[in-house]
C-alpha cells in the first residue's frame, strides 16, 4: 500500500484455555461498519508444542492457515499457506544462532 497508513480495531475472546477468537476491523478510510473490512482469526493450542491458526479475510474471501510447532526450547518450525496468493512458507526459528536474538530462516 505504498506508505499508506493503516489502522484497525481488534477484539479478542478466549473461548477456553486452548481456543481464542479474534475479530479485526480495518478502520482505514472508515465510512461505516462493513463486513468486507473484517478478518476473523481462530487460534487453537493443540498441546504444549503445537499451535494452529486460521484467519478468514472477508474482503477478498481468502483463508490463511498455519501450524507453529516448538521442536525444543531453542527451535520452532512454522508452516503457513494462504489461498489468496497461493503461497506457502516454511520458517525455522532458532534462539541460539542469532547472536543474542533469533535467527529466522524462511
Image: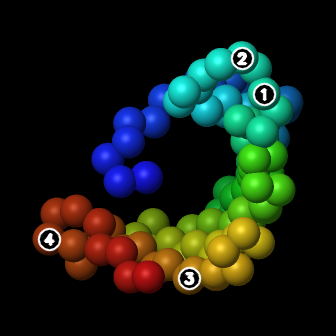
Residue at image coords 66%, 74%: 85
Circle 4 crowding by C-alpha within 10 Å: few under 14, some 14–19, many from 20: few
The earlier-in-sequence mark between 3 and 1 is: 1
Q: Are marks 2 and 1 in contact (CB under 8 Å)?
A: yes
- What kind of element bears circle 1? loop
User: Which corner quadrant of the image does residue 99 belong to?
Assistant: bottom left
Q: How far from the left and from the top, in percent, is residue 87?
A: 64, 80
Instruction: Relative to 7, say whether 79 is above or below.
Output: below
Residue at image coords 63%, 66%: 68
Q: How far from the left and from the top, in percent, is residue 102?
A: 29, 66
The single residue placed furthest to the left in the displayed view is: 99
The residue labelled by disc 4 is 99
Separation of residues labelled 2 and 3 (CA atoms): 38 Å
The residue labelled by disc 1 is 34
Separation of residues labelled 2 and 1 (CA atoms): 6 Å
- 52 or 17, nearer to the observer: 52
- What kind of element bears circle 4? loop
Which disc, if any, is residue 73? none
Amino acid at each position: 500500500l505504498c506508505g499508506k497508513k493503516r489502522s484497525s480495531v481488534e477484539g479478542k475472546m478466549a473461548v477456553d484455555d486452548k481456543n481464542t477468537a479474534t475479530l479485526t476491523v480495518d478502520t482505514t478510510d472508515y465510512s461505516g461498519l462493513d463486513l468486507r473490512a473484517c478478518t476473523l482469526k481462530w487460534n487453537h493450542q493443540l498441546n504444549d508444542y503445537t499451535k494452529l491458526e486460521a484467519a478468514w479475510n472477508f474482503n477478498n474471501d481468502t483463508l490463511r492457515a498455519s501450524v507453529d510447532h516448538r521442536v525444543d526450547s531453542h527451535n520452532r518450525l512454522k508452516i503457513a499457506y494462504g489461498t489468496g496468493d497461493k503461497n506457502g512458507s516454511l520458517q525455522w526459528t532458532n534462539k541460539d544462532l542469532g547472536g543474542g536474538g533469533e535467527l529466522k530462516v524462511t
